[in-house]
Image (cartoon, coloured by chain):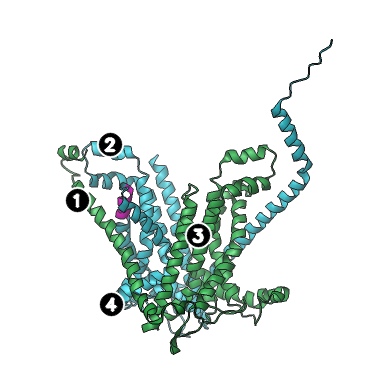
Chain colours: A cyan, B green
């Protein structure tokens, strides 16, 4: 009697063969549909990138010719008068942003420190509040600035700084919390074992260690605050004259762009393009700078 | 631990600085935290109080009434609510497929060498101020829409009835398209982050089973990132709903319900920003009330978006981008 030794059926091999057969039978169709679908993705990438590139291109092409000595040194002039600039808007934006930063950075970072050190119900509520605040439509922040400051003290740079600060505060708080939470516990414990008080640990250990994250967060908040337009329209009113005092109505770059863009005079539209270029360059430099700085500090520490 | 810390002798000599005792430090931080919370409460209370007269004198019917004529005491904001929803819908309908396709292309198709540069570029464009997009839309895109895009759409799709009336350039369609350009970076950045969270093992498993790249994407990656993508979509919607100046610059600002995509219209934020300075009394209160409606919707949409994105286990940096 001859026994034919069939190899035992291996379920894995059988399954593999079935899969290969199924895959091969539809391979052509699947390959075609795959290339079509991926081609559509490439097309969408192009559609998304083209307008973004176009915005940057036009702002450069139309903004650069507006840049001149007068542009950076002269205040806005009445329609038809040549040699007007945006110096008043630059001053307004600088003063308003400086006040907002001076107030919100310490407050935001201390609040972030509190959030990083506490897991209580109060902290959870506050964390949620800060997150909700980042999602508030900016026009309502303008309404708040109007009710809180303008109604009582009139249109002023302070009112604008209040509104911009309100927008920057939650961003700085949350960025600060994330950065402070990243500091290794062992560092804290080592410092406390040496007898340091918590305030000393915060100043000498936590803040320096978390600095890259803190700087990134602050710069991003500033970049965001610089471009806000709607809150400023309701709080600083605009001012075609040079005004250094934040207790008076001021001009700002976003407001100048907004108002001049709809003017019938080519000079003013050109000023708007120049101001848009200036604003875009500053915002992009801050955004890119914050990334580079954070990466550099991170590398240096290792 | 704290009592041990304070009992030990502190550092002496140079470099010794005053340091708050621990309870003082804690109390100080707590005070700052309460200050921030108080600010948030003040914000809400101030707006609600100022909006109350609108509701107490006019009731709630003005929210759904369609005539805006403050000079005659008619404060219907329905045209503006519809304008807000329509521009947002145009922007989102365009941004979802295009943003998603871009995110997929950035995550899987673009050569690895240029991927970081391209991703960073898209993220940076989310930081460009909205007034710059508005300027571009008004000066560059509006003439193109007036001369080319709108006549073409009228010829090709006039039968749908969506493109009646003259082509003006500014109007609902342009506002929606500008919003689309503005929210695409957000959509892309968040989608890319949530797509990256899908486990590599699942992707490799699908490839091992003979799936094509598109099958991997459609059957594994996109379903795995579904919640996060929904979050990205919601976040982009929130941005579009609350955007003010870019829309106000290109929508034409007309207080009537638009019967065509080419018609000028207005949104709730553009209504507020255009009329706030000159209004007093009931009108001011109505504008603040409209702001309150916007605030409630904006906060709900944004919170939902955060919750959706976080539930995928990622804190997407895209959440902090832009407005």
- Tell me, yes or no, whether the highlighted magenta stretch contains residue A39: no
Question: What's the residue at 53%, 65% (across, down)?
Answer: B182
Real-space Cα distance between discs 2 and 1? 21 Å
Marks 4 and 3 close (CB-CB < 8 Å): no
Q: Main secondary structure of the magenta part?
A: helix
Q: Nearer the viewer, mark 4 or mark 3?
A: 3
State which chain disc 3 sits on.
B
Q: Is residue A275 left or right of residue A179?
A: right
Marks 2 and 1 close (CB-CB < 8 Å): no
**Span highlighted in magenta in the image:** A109-116
Residue A285 lies, with reference to residue A89, above or below; the image says: above
Q: Nearer the viewer, mark 2 or mark 4?
A: 4
Question: What's the residue at 53%, 83% (across, down)?
Answer: A264
Real-space Cα distance between discs 2 and 4? 51 Å
- Residue denoted by label 1: B24
Marks 2 and 4 close (CB-CB < 8 Å): no
- Residue denoted by label 4: A152
Can you give x and y, in whole percent of width and height, for residue B288 in the image?
39, 75
Mark found first going from the N terminus, 2 or 4: 4
Can you give x and y, in whole percent of width and height, for residue A142 in the image?
39, 72
Q: Quadrant of residue A62?
A: bottom right
- The numbered disc on residue A64 is none
- The numbered disc on residue A190 is 2
């Amino acid at each position: 009697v001859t026994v034919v030794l069939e190899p035992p059926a291996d379920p894995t091999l059988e399954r593999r063969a079935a899969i290969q057969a199924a895959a091969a039978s539809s391979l052509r169709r699947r390959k075609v549909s795959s290339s079509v679908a991926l081609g559509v993705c490439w097309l969408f990438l192009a559609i998304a990138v083209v307008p973004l590139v176009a915005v940057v291109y036009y702002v450069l092409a139309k903004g650069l010719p507006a840049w001149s000595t007068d542009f950076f040194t002269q205040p806005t002039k009445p329609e038809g008068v040549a040699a007007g600039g945006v110096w008043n808007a630059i001053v307004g934006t600088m003063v308003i942003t400086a006040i907002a930063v001076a107030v919100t950075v310490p407050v935001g970072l201390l609040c972030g420190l509190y959030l990083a050190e506490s897991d209580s119900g109060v902290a959870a509520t506050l964390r949620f509040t800060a997150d909700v605040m980042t999602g508030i439509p900016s026009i309502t922040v303008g309404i708040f600035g109007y009710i809180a400051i303008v109604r009582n003290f009139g249109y002023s740079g302070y009112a604008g700084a209040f509104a911009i600060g309100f927008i920057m505060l939650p961003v700085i708080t949350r960025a600060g919390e994330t950065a402070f939470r990243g500091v290794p516990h062992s560092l804290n414990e080592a410092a406390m074992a040496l007898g340091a008080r918590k305030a000393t640990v915060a100043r000498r250990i936590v803040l320096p260690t978390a600095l890259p994250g803190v700087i990134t967060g602050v710069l991003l908040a500033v970049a965001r605050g610089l471009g806000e337009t709607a809150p400023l329209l309701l709080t600083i009113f605009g001012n075609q004259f040079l005004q250094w005092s934040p207790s008076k109505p001021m001009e700002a770059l976003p407001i100048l762009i907004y108002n001049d863009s709809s003017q019938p005079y080519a000079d003013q539209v050109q000023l708007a393009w120049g101001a848009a270029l200036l604003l875009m360059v500053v915002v992009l430099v801050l955004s890119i700078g914050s990334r580079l700085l954070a990466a550099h500090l991170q590398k240096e520490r290792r | 631990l704290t009592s041990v810390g304070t009992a030990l002798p502190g550092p002496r000599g140079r470099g010794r600085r005053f340091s708050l005792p621990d309870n003082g430090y804690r109390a100080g931080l707590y005070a700052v935290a309460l200050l921030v919370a108080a600010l948030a409460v003040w914000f809400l209370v101030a707006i609600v109080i100022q909006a109350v007269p609108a509701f107490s004198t006019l009731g709630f019917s003005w929210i759904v009434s369609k005539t805006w004529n403050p000079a005659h005491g008619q404060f219907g904001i329905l045209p503006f609510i519809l304008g807000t929803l329509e521009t947002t819908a145009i922007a989102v309908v365009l941004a979802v497929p295009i943003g998603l396709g871009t995110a997929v292309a950035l995550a899987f198709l673009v050569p690895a060498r240029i991927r970081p540069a391209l991703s960073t570029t898209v993220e940076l464009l989310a930081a460009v101020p909205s007034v710059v997009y508005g300027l571009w839309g008004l000066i560059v895109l509006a003439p193109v829409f007036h001369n080319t895009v709108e006549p073409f759409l009228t010829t090709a799709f006039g039968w749908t009835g969506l493109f009646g009336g003259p082509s003006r350039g500014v109007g609902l369609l342009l506002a929606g398209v500008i919003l689309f350009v503005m929210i695409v970076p957000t959509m892309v950045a968040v989608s890319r982050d949530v797509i990256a969270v899908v486990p590599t093992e699942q992707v490799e498993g699908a490839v091992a089973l003979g799936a094509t790249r598109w099958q991997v994407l459609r059957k594994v990656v996109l379903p795995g990132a579904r919640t996060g993508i929904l979050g990205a979509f919601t976040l982009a919607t929130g941005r579009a709903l609350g955007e003010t100046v870019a829309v106000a610059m290109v929508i034409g600002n007309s207080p009537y319900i638009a019967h065509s995509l080419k018609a000028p219209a207005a949104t709730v934020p553009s209504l507020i920003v255009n009329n706030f300075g000159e209004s007093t009394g009931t009108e001011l209160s109505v504008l603040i009330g409209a702001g309150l409606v916007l605030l409630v919707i904006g906060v709900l949409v944004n919170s939902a978006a955060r919750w959706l994105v976080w539930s995928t286990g990622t804190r997407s940096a895209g959440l902090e981008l832009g407005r």
